Amino acid sequence: MCADGRKVRLRKAVPADLSALEALESLCFPSDRQSSRRSMSNSLRSPTQSVWVAEAGNTAVGAMVLFVYPRRLRIYSIAVALGHRDLGAGKRLVRLAKALARRGRREAVTLEADVRNNVLIDWYCRQGFQQTEILEDYYGPGQPACRMEWACSRNRREAAL
Ligand SMILES: CC(C)(COP(=O)(O)OP(=O)(O)OC[C@H]1O[C@@H](n2cnc3c(N)ncnc32)[C@H](O)[C@@H]1OP(=O)(O)O)[C@@H](O)C(=O)NCCC(=O)NCCS
C-alpha cells in the first residue's frame, strides 16, 4: 500500500508520463546522476529500452528504466518518491524486472550500483543479487560502480512467481 493508503499499480510508461518521470529523476537522484528530459524521452521511444511506472491513484510515485539486451535485462535506473518509500514499491519494480527477464527467456537481470552506497547494495543483495565485478571510474574518475546480477537459472522458482 502507498503512504496515503492507496494501492500502487505498475504499468508501462507512455509519452504522457515524461514530465512525471523528469520530476522523479530530479527528486530521487543527485544532479550529476539524473537523466535529462531528452534522454528520458529517448528511453520512452527506444525499442531497446522499457520504462515502467509505479502509480498511486493517478500519480507516478516510482519509475524503472530497463535496457533490453539479447541475453539480459539491465536495470538502468529505479526510483521511488520520498513520501512513498519503504512500502515495497521498489521491490515490486525489481520483481517485475526479474519476471520480464524470465518471460523473455533471458539469462539474468544486471545493474550497476555506486560501491559507496552500501544501503543500496544490501537492498539488492536481499533481493538475490550478487556482486560480479567492479567497474572503475564508472561514474567518473575515482568513482567506481559494482555490477550486480540476478541469474534466472539460479532463481527459477522466484522468477516464475
Ligand atoms: C532504492 C529505492 C528505489 C527503494 O525503493 P523503496 O520503494 O523504498 O523500496 P522498498 O520499500 O521496496 O524497500 C525498502 C527497503 O529499502 C531500504 N531503503 C530505504 N532507503 C533506501 C535507500 N536510499 N537506498 C536503498 N535502500 C533503502 C529500507 O531500509 C527497506 O529495507 P528492508 O528491505 O529491510 O525493509 C529508493 O530508496 C530510491 O528511490 N532511492 C533513490 C534512488 C536510487 O538510489 N535508486 C537506485 C539506483 S538507480
Image: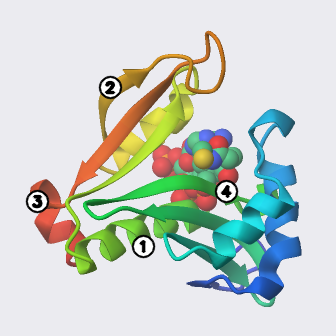
Which sits earlier in the primary sequence, circle 3 or circle 1? Answer: 1
Above-or-below relation of 115 to 29: above
x, y percentage for residue 51?
A: 60, 73
Give the side of residue 124 with respect to residue 106, left or right.
right
Which sits earlier in the primary sequence, circle 4 or circle 2? Answer: 4
> Which class describes the residues within 10 Å of circle 3: few (<14), some (14-19), or many (20+)?
few
Instruction: Measure the alpha-carbon separation of dots 3 and 2.
Output: 19 Å
Q: Is mark 4 within 8 Å of ligand 1?
A: yes
Is residue 107 visible in the rendered image? The answer is: yes
Residue holding disc 1: 96
Residue holding disc 4: 79
Above-or-below relation of 104 to 94: below
Which sits earlier in the primary sequence, circle 4 or circle 3? Answer: 4
Q: Which mark is residue 153?
A: 3
| Circle 3 or circle 2, nearest the eye | 2
> Which class describes the residues within 10 Å of circle 1: few (<14), some (14-19), or many (20+)?
some
Kind of element beneath mark 3:
helix
Residue type highlighted by circle 2: Glu
Above-or-below relation of 122 to 109: above
Instruction: Measure the alpha-carbon separation of dots 4 and 3.
Output: 27 Å
Q: Is mark 3 within 8 Å of ligand 1?
A: no
